[in-house]
Image (cartoon, rainbow, N blue to C red):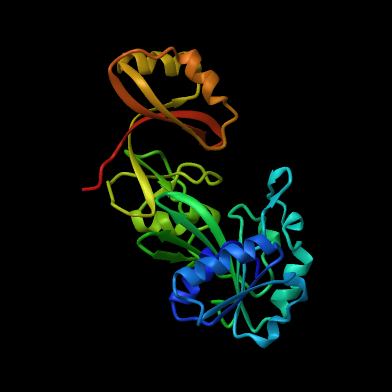
Amino acid sequence: MCCGIGGDLIALARAGCEVDAVDTDPLTVAVARANIDALGLSELATVRTADAATVDPSGYDVLFADPARRTARGRTFDPHAYSPPWPVVLDLLGRAPAACLKVAPGIPYEFVPEGAEAEWVSHRGEVKEAVLWTGRLSGGAGVRRATLLPGGSTLTATGAEAEVGPMGRFVYEPDGAAIRAHLVAEVAGRVGGRLADPMIAYITGDDPVDTEWASRYEVHEAMPFSVKRLRAALRARQVGNATIKKRASAVDIERLRRDLRLSGDKSAVVILTRIMDRPSALICTPSRPA
């Protein structure tokens, strides 16, 4: 349902699935049909003009739906503004024996249907999609999963709880899919780390542990946040090029960059965050995998 010009339709047909695809826009349907014809997939896939709300999913093995997430004003983050709208989507899910529903990665957690598995997908470090699995495709009610592409590694909740402790030699920034899936504690367990603040998704540790689930930085200096103090520390290190990251900080990065007036031939990563509820700044450099 909502097949568009056929990207997912083509992938499903190439995987050997028999696909009946629908979209409300006749021109889009014509393009999707031309694509499957050109790729020799017309024996496995059909495309027709129809409103998803009028299709009965109970007659199919699986419902695959990708509701439109754009309106005349641009991209929408409100599921009620999807096309078809959220109540219609939920009705379709409820009548399908199994379903795979693509949604925005920022979907509010309260919109995840009861009994569904929620998966967040990251591609080369950028969260691209969230997927809700229902029926026999669901791993169980409340299951949260993060998946990394192109490798396909996956991580699920284990019930782990991360310890909280002092800032160590290294800081780890978990992949966004793990953060969205509330799997920061699971990532901390993989690197033997702890949280420097119980509410912030930065992990710290004393040893350089390699993991595909987080970027690692070596911490050279940690300080309470102050523009004057940070500027002096960066100048002392001759930092002229700074990558500034922030989490739980209200600082305007571009204004801070102007205020720092950086000069020098060295590079650094500046992390603005809160440590035990205190605004803090970390001066770091990327720590390469061993």
Q: Name the residue: 72% across, 52% down.
A: 78
Q: Is residue 233 left or right of residue 97?
A: left
Q: Foreground: 112 or 126? A: 126
Q: Is residue 289 above or below residue 108?
A: above
**Could you tell me residue 131's position as x and y percent?**
57, 65
Q: Position of residue 181 (x, y in %)?
A: 54, 58
Q: Residue at x 50, y 13 (%)?
A: 259
Judge whether 60 appears above or below 187 on screen.
Answer: below
How many numbered badges does the structure rendering display? 0
Q: Answer yes or no: is residue 144 visible.
A: no
Q: Quadrant of residue 88?
A: bottom right
Residue 13 pos. (x, y %): 48, 76
Seen at 27% across and 46% down, the residue is: 208
Q: Is residue 38 above or below residue 125?
A: below
Side (left or right) of 233 relative to 3: left
Q: Quadrant of residue 113?
A: bottom right
Q: Is residue 175 above or below residue 252?
A: below
